[in-house]
């Protein structure tokens, strides 16, 4: 019969905790990516709604933040031009249609990243489950 040392059990527990920490960190990152996807969706809907209002010859009224939780009312007179964040601190002016396409591409990229992260999370969970099974096997002979 193989003798199981406390050190073996501690090593398994440490590996399990490390998998758990990595999985938790990954979950937090996944939440941030999901928030970015939601933000892309919201921006797309808003741009499309503004395009519709503009096409009808109307102006849209909105509130613009001026800092410290304060807002002013403003009218959007030209909804066909949108400033889009390109990343790394750069922005560009695009037509509303171009902006929607840019946001669509960004959402697709973020969705792929989220899928990859989900696959990694699955591997961490499987790793934790394998360690749990191994720990159970190691403890069974000592209980006999």
Image (tube, grey):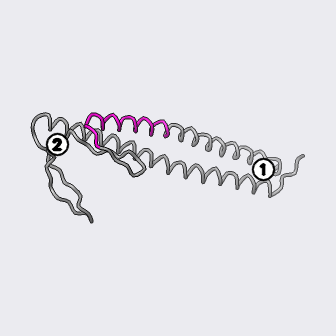
**Location of residue 89 in the rendering, given as x and y in whole percent from the top left corner:** 39, 52
- Would residue 91 appear left or right of 141 to someone viewing this image? left
Decide which of 111, 15 is in the foreground and name it.
111
The numbered mark at residue 139 is 1
**Outermost residue toward the left?**
57
- Which secondary structure class fits the magenta region best? helix
Mark 2 lies on residue = 78
Q: Earlier in the sequence, mark 2 or mark 1?
A: 2
Q: Quadrant of residue 6?
A: bottom right
Give the structural element (helix, strand or loop) at label 1.
helix
Label 1 Cα neighbours within 10 Å, binned few <14 / some 14-19 / many ≥20: some
Q: Disc 2 to disc 1, how far (Cα)?
A: 71 Å
**Location of residue 90 in the rendering, given as x and y in whole percent from the top left corner:** 37, 49
Q: Which residues are magenta?
A: 93-113
**Outermost residue toward the right?**
1
- Which residue sits at x=25%, y=40%? 47
């Amino acid at each position: 019969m193989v003798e199981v040392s406390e050190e073996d059990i501690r090593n398994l527990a440490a590996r399990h905790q490390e998998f758990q920490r990595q999985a938790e960190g990954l979950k937090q990152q996944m939440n941030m990516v999901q928030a970015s996807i939601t933000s892309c969706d919201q921006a797309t809907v808003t741009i499309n709604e503004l395009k519709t209002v503009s096409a009808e010859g109307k102006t849209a009224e909105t509130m613009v933040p001026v800092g410290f939780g304060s807002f002013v009312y403003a009218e959007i007179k030209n909804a066909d031009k949108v400033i889009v964040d390109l990343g790394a601190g750069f922005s560009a002016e695009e037509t509303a249609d171009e902006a929607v396409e840019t946001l669509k591409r960004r959402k697709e990229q973020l969705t792929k990243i989220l899928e990859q992260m989900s696959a990694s999370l699955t591997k961490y969970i499987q790793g934790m489950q394998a360690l749990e099974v191994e720990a159970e096997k190691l403890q069974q002979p000592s209980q006999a």
